[in-house]
Image (cartoon, rainbow, N blue to C red):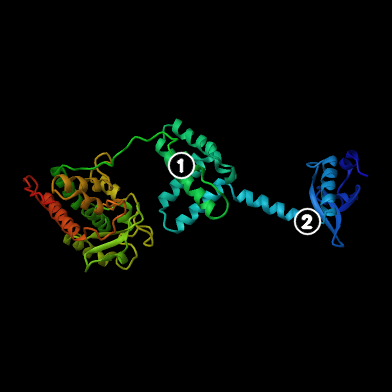
Amino acid sequence: MLTDTKLRTLKSRESAYRIADTNGLCIEVRPTGAKVWRYRYRHAGKASIITMAEYPVMGLSEARAERDRLRALVRGGGNPAHAARIERAAKLERSEATFGAIAAELLVKRAKEGLSPGSVKRERRLIEKDMAAISDIPITDVTAPLLLASLRKMERRGVVETAHRSRSLAGRVFRYAIATGRAQSNPADDLAGALEQPQTKHFASITDPTKIGDLLRAMYSYRGSPVTLAALKLAPLLFVRPGELRKARWADIDLRASEWRFTASKTGTPHIVPLSSQAKEILEELRPLTSRREFVFPGVRSAKRPMSENTVNAALRYLGYSGDIITGHGFRAMARTVLDEVLGFRPDYIEHQLAHAVRDPLGRAYNRTVHLAERRKMMQAWADYLDQLRESEGKVVSIRRKAG
């Protein structure tokens, strides 16, 4: 029978050896000097042995208690080795089922599906830094109060928008965990209205016709990459979301039909952009440069990726227009304002063309072909108007309001 004194005095040998205690418990001394508790038993008529833990991490009394538990398991027909494998697998599963691990797994999936490198970087930062307090917690243990406490820290730092983005990201993680069988509820949904509301910030834009003309002349004077120049010219003509413009694919553009068809990034619905003659001309000039690539505006470092999300804004900065004056997204506000207040087009035509979620009187989303003929006329009128502004330096542009 072993004692603590005897255990402490056991020395290593050239090969491993065992000293028995009682009822199948023994200590194995290895050449490295490690002392490991092992339990010998018979299951289904076959002799087996299982490693329990290392001494002195597990003391003598603890080892005997564990031995007694395993003996009871054997008497009940169980196999300690099999039970140990199940327990190890469960521990591994728990470690792989933390909020941070599942979030990282989802991020890899989203990156493969086309999430931009910049967005991947931002979401990883939210997971690893802003939500670090819950990252190592099993996702099934992350409750609404626990998630809220993590988000409140961001509120106290004054980054309310980041807190809302983090809640949205957490919601995606929980939905993915539910879909893959690793969670049963989404605590992020329970936090609706629990956070401070961020102050609304509008994208910087230019809506004064004279200043629009100045901007267009500056843009057309750009002497950088012809691909960037084409993106600059098309941004105000098409007024799609910046991410949709830079990710445009030649396969989605039909120059004969004067259409660009794609899925709107924000609503996930099919969308049609009628191409004015000016837009078609720009694309025709660009086609010899990039049509062999997937993207209309391929990236500089890799043609397999679209241009950087900062390219258009960087070009505007180069031309002297700071982010407080105009951004790539600001061309949407420009078009919305001028098409309504100056050119007099119906607001629903404009909203459809902006790919906003416009609904009919019964609450149903309109399909992408609604008002398409009128939108074609509007897009051509808009392109003609921009040309007039660009070419009318020092002149007064006379505009006749369209009939609604």
Q: Real-space Cα distance between discs 1 and 2?
A: 43 Å
Q: Which residue is mark 2?
A: 81
| Label 2: element kind | helix
Which numbered marker is on residue 117? none
Q: Earlier in the sequence, mark 1 or mark 2?
A: 2
Residue 229 lies, with reference to residue 284, above or below; the image says above
| The residue positioned farthest toward the right in the image shown | 1
Residue drawn 80% across the image and 42% down it: 58
Residue 16 lies, with reference to residue 194, above or below; the image says below
Q: Which residue is mark 1?
A: 167
> Does residue 15 appear anywhere in the picture?
no
Q: Quadrant of the N terminus?
A: top right
Residue 52 in the image, given as x and y percentages of width and height? 79, 49
Residue drawn 17% across the image and 58% down it: 374
Residue drawn 33% across the image and 66% down it: 293
Residue 166 in the image, given as x and y percentages of width and height? 45, 42
Residue 372 in the image, given as x and y percentages of width and height? 21, 60
Answer left or right for 345 relative to 67: left
Label 2 crowd (10 A; few <14 / some 14-19 / many >=20): some
Label 1 crowd (10 A; few <14 / some 14-19 / many >=20): many
Residue 169 in the image, given as x and y percentages of width and height? 46, 46
Q: Nearer the viewer, residue 156 or 347?
A: 347
Amino acid type at mark 1: Arg
Residue 367 lies, with reference to residue 339, above or below; the image says below
